[in-house]
Image: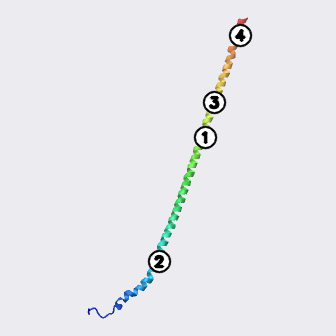
Amino acid sequence: MREDLGITPAPALTAGALGAVPIVVGLWPVLLTGIYAISQRKDKVAEEEQALAVAAAQQATQEKAAAELKKTLEMKEKEKETAINMAVKKALEEAAKEQEEAAKAAEEAAQADDAAPEGQDDKDEKQTEEDS
């Protein structure tokens, strides 16, 4: 046996370390539960913030889409009005052209009718003279 170790008993040497065990055993579960609760709360807050951000992004996208749709509808309405106006204008021009052609044809027919009776009268007179 060694005699240079001293006369201090072993429990006196380990009393400090063994005295901390009940404190550690009592506090570690509380500390670990607190850390777990904080991390769970942090995750929950992050999910809520993400959900709010997604909702805000969806709303912004829907507003933008609605604005683009409105703009497109207005543009299409203007195009439709322009197309209608062009079709009406074209139809009016065609109708005016047809009226001009009809008036020309009527005028030519009237001139032909005026010219035909004169020529017809001359023929009738010649036949009458020849008959007599």
Three-letter code, disc 4: Glu
Q: What coloring was used for the rendering?
A: rainbow
Query: What residue does disc 2 label?
Result: 33
For discs 4 and 3, the disc positioned in front in the rendered view: 3
Count of picture labels: 4
Tell me how far mark 3 sits from mark 1, CA to CA.
20 Å
Tag 1 or tag 3, which sits nearer the N-term? 1
In front here: 8 or 54?
A: 8
Q: Residue at x 61, y 37 (%)?
A: 89
Of the image marks 2 and 3, the number of the one nearer the N terminus: 2
Q: Position of residue 65 (x, y in %)?
A: 54, 54
Circle 3 sits in a helix, a strand or a loop, which is it? helix
Crowd rating for badge 4 (residues with CA inside 10 Å; few <14, some 14–19, many 20+): few
Q: Position of residue 18 (x, y in %)?
A: 38, 87
| Pick the front one: 77 or 48 | 48
Residue 24 quadrant: bottom left
Circles 4 and 3 in contact, beta carbons < 8 Å: no
Q: Please report the residue visible at 45 percent of the width from the left and 76 percent of the height from the top.
A: 35
**Looking at numbered disc 1 in the image, what kind of residue is underneath it?**
Asn
Q: Which amino acid is tagged 2?
A: Thr
Question: How far apart are labels 1 and 2 at the CA level?
Answer: 77 Å
Residue placed under numbered mark 4 in the picture: 125
Residue on which disc 1 sits: 85
User: In what quadrant of the picture does the N terminus appear?
Assistant: bottom left
Mark closer to the observer (4, 2): 2
Under tag 4, what secondary structure? Answer: helix
Question: Which badge, 1 or 4, is on the more N-terminal residue?
Answer: 1
Eyeballing the image, is 38 above or below 64? Answer: below
**Which of the numbered marks, if any, corresponds to residue 98?**
3
